[in-house]
Image (cartoon, rainbow, N blue to C red):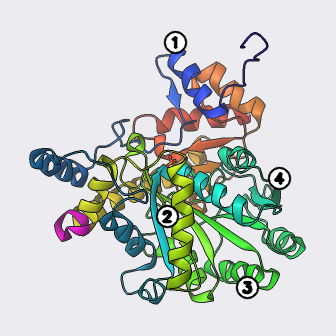
Amino acid sequence: LFAAVEMAPRDPILGLNEAFNAEKNPAKVNLGVGVYFGDDGKIPLLAAVKAAEKARLEAQPPRGYQPIEGTPAYNGAVQNLMFGKDSELLAAGRAVTCQCLGGTGALKVGADYLKRLLPDASVYISDPSWENHRALFEGAGFPVKEYAYYDAATRGVNFAGMKAALAAMPAKSIVVLHACCHNPTGADLTVAQWKEVVAAIKERNLVAFIDMAYQGFADGIKEDAAALDLFAASGLQFFVSSSFSKSFSLYGERVGALTIVTDSKDESARVLSQVKRVIRTNYSNPPTHGGAVVAAVLSSPELRQMWEDELGGMRDRIRAMRTSLVANLKAEGAPNFDFINVQRGMFSYTGLTAAQVEKMRADYGIYAVGTGRICVAALNTKNIGYVAKAIAAVLK
Ligand code: PMP
């Protein structure tokens, strides 16, 4: 049965972790991961999460099955966070939300459902995109193509290229968009550009699938949902995958959601019934703990404030690391890195070549992705000087 099975290639980023763990250099730094670390180099366990977990542990709730789509408490909280609790779209019953296994699980359930709805469509992802987008949609049976996005010259968005790509897509194509904190580049669209994207999607009759994995990591909870507000106001139907892995620092609990915006309450009920079939035949229903914790935090005014403060702290720390990295690089005599202050979220496309990334690894024990992507959220006051020195040195 298994004699002819070939070894699959290692996941490029998780593979990097394995190599990092085996690295002997005591000064080693891992900038390859997609995880937020505090200044102490550790993954934080948020105080709001701890408080909700303590209460949950003390209540000793039974562990029955959840509904296929998760609980109304969780799904409602997710909707309010994304669209605002006074949203007309929500009041009209136009949104269907299902708790899913992280953002990845939401993308997968959405992709499988879309394959049933639009079996002949193509999926377009940004060039470049989060490395799992392509495999995920290909795995659901779609051909996956790319639209122009990143401009290596400005280290920002090639918006003219993106618009031209949107204008050339066949009707009913599925377009995967990053709501904020673009992974891997850190280059986001402005609100004015989002308006043009929404208009192009409407005009071309495309289907937007918005991936929102970092709400609150760029400018704030509401600010980072600006693209969603524009889609909501457009009257379009669209998909959103969202994740609490980063914003609640709950990576391993796998807490996310798929939200589908339809035309009416009646459509929503029918769509939900179909998405439930996708979930039922996949993992049946979501796990309880992470969703219960997130719902508890979001529905308690006190815990919510605590969480918003902690999220703000993570956001501010990332910003401070960006400013400090630019300043340290300047002090080391490196070429201009001001673009790092413009890029948003956890990642930065530094422009370092694969050879320079390799030299950082070999000479300094600093690990980054071969594309030049670094995780800014893995920098801290102790390692940032060393990292800046290494970057400046490999650029000489
Ligand atoms: N989408 C993007 C753009 C991401 O960066 C990530 C996480 N790295 C995900 C989705 C997946 O999120 P989760 O870990 O919650 O599955």
Q: Label 2: state its secondary structure.
A: loop
**Mark 2 lies within 8 Å of ligand 1 (Cβ measured):** no
Q: Is residue 264 left or right of residue 76?
A: right
The verdict on residue 33 being magenta is: no
The image quadrant where one finds the N terminus is top right
Of the two numbered discs 1 and 2 on the same chain, state the one appearing first in sequence: 1
Label 1 Cα neighbours within 10 Å, binned few <14 / some 14-19 / many ≥20: few
Q: Which residue matches tag 1? A: 24
Which residue is drawn at the image coordinates 77% and 29% (left, top)?
355
Of the two numbered discs 3 and 1 on the same chain, state the one appearing first in sequence: 1
Q: Which residues are magenta?
A: 299-304
Q: Label 1: state its secondary structure.
A: loop
Q: Is residue 236 left or right of residue 91?
A: right
* Distance Cα–Cα, label 3 vs label 2: 24 Å
Q: What is the three-letter code of the residue carrying label 2?
A: Ala
Residue 139 appears in the rendering: yes
Residue 150 screen position, x and y as percent: 76, 58
